[in-house]
Image: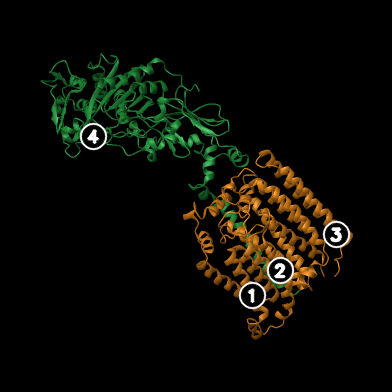
Chain colours: A green, B orange
């Protein structure tokens, strides 16, 4: 055979090239497939995500806050039925990703939080069943949330309600919010909207502390063992700080005020005077240690989406007074110490919880696909001691005996009202609590561009009253 | 010429083997047609399946009568590959499936006719220059009168058409060139192999016997590349020619110099022709332009990745993200829906076709024309398959050639079947 040797060589080359094709295909199909499929420009990724049967989000009483429904054509759509929870639950969009609770628990809701079991893999890869995520039950109480949102109305601000001692977050309202059912259509408008609806004021708000700092300051005074019975003549007089004139949040009936009375009416002068008798570094250390300016971590939740959050505007992060801050400005809340609604609520929870701040939690239970019941999520972080039991008890008593707002809020609600200033804008605050046997609720309200502390108090009272109406039966869905 | 002697038992065994393989191919087709019908992604998979069955079993029945000693593997493999292709077109481009089915029937008839005509091999050998002139006329005709069936401006005009029926002459040119070269080199092979003297070998460089066809083929490839912007066909012609020249002469330096010429031509083409530059740039690094010029290649790689080992199953992948998937990128679609296992099965089929081709060539010990024709046809199948599969998975720059028997394209299918018919004929006419 004349061509035998050459034919053999050519055949070898061809077979080697076929082998190379096989190996290269194996590489892309088995080894390099993850990096390829996870590319952002892979349209298959969108299809896969679109087909996921995302888990339902319930509140503590079993009210559906978000669910996935199928249209007549079989296309899946995320629906948010509770308007009051819009800003908190966030959004799920194929185009814009996730935000809020949807983002915080995305792995659970989309079923990607743990390696798929063999049966799930077979279902997905062989039978092409769409992936199903877990249902989650939040600690939120939609009645409290709705009451707070309704009372706040169209005002800009935030309301947060915590339960003590278990640290459950019952309500988180940030106003203005957005309608996640219309997110894709409204996105462009929302990103430039006045009031920055994507900005979660409960979690990201950083306000001048103002008179809210009097509660921590009362704690420091109590810890220092100062005599709080001393009377301040003309304690109701305004005080000038830089270019600001700070006055009482609520006009007191008399000019002579004790410190608890000054605290009740939110009058700054007695605090300015007594702060001069305190050890300055120790006071500042104590105030800073309360970490009022930032939201504490909520167990296993990263609730704010940086990509969807516009840069906070001047009203949320004022710079007024930072350069000229002094000790007095600091203790009057117009210096460097900032306040975040959730941070303040956490501090308040420590006051009500005998000095220990409970770990916060928003996720109560998880129900896996095809599972019969709910799996309770283990308790959040252990309580953190912030003050002594005696100091906490004394501050709690001062708040309970606060008579300044008794015509507005129920006498069994412990409270404090305050005003803070940022540039030309003011914020009205209400810090309150109500006790129900072994449990208590803490509420913090901030209303932007307002000095109407009465309105803030009414919002707080509305939120607390909604809870007292009926305690929801846990785990009902 | 004499027929190979096979005793009755061996002949019976071959018939059984072929029948079994064809039955397996039919089962494969039936299962996939059923899946397509259940998924309702295709218009008429059952109709096309039944036509395929009739074509496959009709061809088997006819060839069994006229060519009882044929190779038992080729027909089942060719029918399996073409049926697989028909399924893919049914799934990927339903509106083309009817037309492809008609082409399949015509191609099978052509295959049977080719395998039956007793003197075809002799005619191919004797009238090689006539054949070459006919081929060149086809090429010139395409350059002057070529159209694109889509009618879109800026698309390659590689087809000749009458009314709505189009034919791609470069497909016929493959066979014409292979037949011409086989005939020419068969005549020269004795001379090419006559001496082991190095001086004599060196003088062969300048021998018109080598230089002539080399320049002819080079010129032909340049014409195809410049006038038709058809990189794939040009590369295919030249590589098949080099292989035949190497087999006929036994001189490795011919391959080396030919490859050198190819590389030099490639470098020049990279500088001169935007289509070549584009293909090479995309091959080297497609990722920066994944949404633009490299979209097809990147999407095809994603399709392969999406298929994994087992594939998504027919009708359940998303290969339609790849533009022109039913033609140039049918391999990627196959990899997505049948997975790595499907690709290995396809490669095995193609590998067996190549092995059988070389086996048939090996049987023609004293008939160099038959041997070279067999090798040439086999190499067309092999190189064309490697070029498009390697291009899809980024081993080589992408060249727009079809995957034999599988891709959509009537001309390609028809010429593939005619070449398969020749192989079947050659498998009988052994020494």
The image shows residue A333, relative to residue B422, as above or below, that is above
Of labels 3 and 1, earlier in sequence is 3
* B300 and A36: which is toward the camera: B300
* B88 and A451: which is toward the camera: B88
* Residues flagged by tags 2 and 3 on a common chain: yes
Subunit ID for the residue under disc 3: B
The image shows residue A403, relative to residue B251, as above or below, that is above
- Residue at numbered disc 4: A337
- Residue at numbered disc 3: B66
Q: Residues within 10 Å of mark 1 (few under 14, many from 20)?
A: some
| Mark pair 4, 1: CA separation | 87 Å
Q: Are marks 1 and 2 in contact (CB under 8 Å)?
A: no
| Mark pair 2, 3: CA separation | 30 Å
* A352 and A273: which is toward the camera: A273
Q: Residues within 10 Å of mark 3 (few under 14, many from 20)?
A: few
Of circles 1 and 2, the one toward us is 2
- Residue B214 is labelled as 1
Residue B360 location in percent, x, y? Answer: 77, 65
- Residue at numbered disc 2: B134
Q: Is residue A134 visible?
A: no
Which residue is located at x 63 percent, y 61 percent? Answer: B146
Of circles 2 and 4, the one toward us is 2
């Amino acid at each position: 055979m004349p061509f035998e040797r050459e034919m053999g060589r050519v055949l070898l080359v061809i077979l080697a090239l076929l082998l190379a094709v096989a190996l290269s295909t194996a590489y892309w199909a088995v080894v390099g497939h993850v990096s390829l499929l996870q590319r952002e420009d892979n349209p298959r990724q969108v299809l896969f995500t679109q087909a996921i049967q995302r888990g339902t989000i319930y509140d503590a009483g079993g009210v559906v806050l978000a669910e996935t429904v199928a249209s007549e054509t079989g296309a899946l759509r995320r629906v948010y039925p509770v308007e009051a929870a819009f800003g908190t639950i966030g959004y799920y969009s194929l185009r814009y990703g996730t935000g809020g609770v949807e983002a915080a628990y995305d792995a659970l809701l989309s079923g990607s939080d743990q390696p798929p079991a063999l049966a799930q893999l077979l279902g997905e890869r062989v039978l092409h069943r769409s992936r199903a995520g877990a249902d989650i039950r939040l600690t939120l109480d939609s009645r409290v949330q709705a009451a707070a949102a309704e009372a706040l109305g169209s005002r800009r601000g935030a309301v947060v309600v915590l339960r003590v001692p278990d640290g459950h977050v019952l309500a988180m309202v940030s106003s203005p919010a957005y309608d996640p059912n219309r997110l894709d259509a409204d996105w462009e408008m929302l990103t430039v909207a006045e009031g920055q609806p994507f900005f979660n004021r409960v979690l990201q708000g950083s306000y001048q502390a103002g008179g809210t700092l009097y509660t921590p300051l009362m704690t420091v005074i109590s810890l220092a063992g100062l005599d709080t019975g001393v009377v301040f003549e003309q304690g109701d007089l305004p005080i000038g700080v830089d270019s600001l004139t700070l006055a009482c949040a609520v006009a007191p009936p008399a000019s002579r005020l004790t410190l608890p009375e000054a605290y009740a009416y939110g009058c700054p002068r007695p605090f300015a005077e007594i702060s001069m008798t305190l050890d300055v570094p120790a006071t500042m250390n104590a105030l800073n240690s309360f970490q009022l300016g930032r939201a504490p971590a909520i167990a296993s939740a990263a609730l704010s989406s940086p990509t969807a959050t516009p840069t906070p505007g001047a009203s949320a992060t004022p710079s007024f007074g930072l350069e000229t801050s002094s000790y007095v400005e600091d203790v009057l809340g117009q210096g460097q110490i900032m306040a975040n609604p959730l941070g303040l609520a956490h501090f308040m929870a420590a006051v009500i919880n005998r000095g220990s701040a409970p770990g916060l939690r928003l996720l109560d239970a998880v129900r896996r696909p095809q599972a019969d019941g709910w799996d309770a999520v283990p308790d959040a972080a252990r309580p953190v001691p912030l003050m002594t039991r005696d100091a906490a008890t004394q501050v709690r008593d001062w708040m309970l005996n606060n008579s300044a707002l008794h015509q507005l809020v129920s006498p069994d609600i412990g409270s404090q009202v305050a005003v803070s200033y940022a540039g030309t804008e003011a914020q009205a605050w209400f810090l309150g609590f109500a006790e129900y046997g072994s449990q208590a609720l803490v509420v913090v309200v901030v209303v932007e561009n307002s000095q109407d502390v009465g309105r803030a108090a009414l919002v707080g009272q509305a939120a607390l009253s909604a809870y007292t109406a009926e305690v929801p039966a846990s785990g009902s869905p | 010429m004499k027929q190979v002697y096979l005793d009755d038992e061996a002949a019976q065994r071959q018939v059984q083997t072929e029948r079994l393989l064809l039955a397996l191919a039919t089962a494969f087709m039936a299962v996939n047609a059923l899946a397509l019908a259940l998924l309702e992604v295709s218009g008429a998979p059952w109709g096309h399946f039944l036509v395929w069955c009739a074509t496959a079993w009709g061809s088997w029945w006819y060839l069994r009568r006229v060519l009882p000693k044929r190779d038992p593997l080729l027909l089942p493999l060719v029918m399996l590959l073409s049926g697989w292709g028909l399924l893919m077109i049914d799934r990927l481009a339903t509106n083309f499936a009817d037309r492809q089915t008609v082409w399949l029937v015509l191609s099978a008839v052509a295959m049977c006719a080719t395998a039956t005509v007793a003197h075809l091999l002799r005619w191919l050998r004797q009238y090689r220059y006539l054949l070459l002139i006919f081929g060149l006329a086809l090429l010139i005709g395409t350059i002057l009168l070529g159209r694109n069936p889509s009618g879109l401006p800026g698309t390659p005009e590689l087809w000749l058409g009458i009314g709505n029926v189009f034919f791609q002459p470069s497909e016929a040119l493959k066979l014409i060139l292979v037949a011409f070269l086989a005939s020419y080199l068969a005549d020269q092979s004795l001379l090419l192999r006559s001496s082991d003297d190095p001086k004599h070998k060196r003088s062969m460089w300048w021998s018109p016997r080598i230089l002539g066809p080399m320049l002819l083929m080079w010129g032909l490839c340049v014409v195809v590349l410049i006038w038709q912007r058809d990189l794939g066909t040009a590369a295919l012609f030249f590589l098949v020619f080099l292989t035949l020249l190497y087999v006929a002469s036994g001189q490795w330096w011919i391959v080396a110099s030919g490859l050198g010429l190819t590389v030099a031509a490639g470098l020049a083409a990279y500088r001169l022709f935007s289509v070549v530059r584009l293909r090479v740039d995309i091959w080297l690094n497609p990722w920066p332009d994944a949404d633009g010029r490299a979209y097809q290649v990147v999407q095809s790689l994603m399709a392969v990745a999406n298929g994994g080992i087992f594939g998504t199953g027919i009708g359940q992948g998303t290969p339609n993200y790849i533009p022109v998937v039913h033609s140039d990128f049918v391999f990627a679609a196959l990899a997505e829906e049948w997975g790595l296992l499907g690709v290995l099965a396809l490669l095995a089929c193609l590998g067996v076709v190549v092995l059988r081709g070389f086996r048939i060539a090996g049987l023609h010990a004293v008939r160099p024309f038959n041997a070279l024709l067999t090798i040439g046809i086999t190499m067309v199948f092999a190189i064309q398959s490697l070029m498009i599969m390697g291009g899809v998975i980024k081993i080589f720059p992408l060249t727009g050639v079809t995957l034999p028997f599988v891709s959509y394209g009537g001309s390609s299918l028809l010429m593939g079947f005619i070449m398969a018919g020749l192989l079947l004929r050659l498998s009988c006419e052994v020494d």
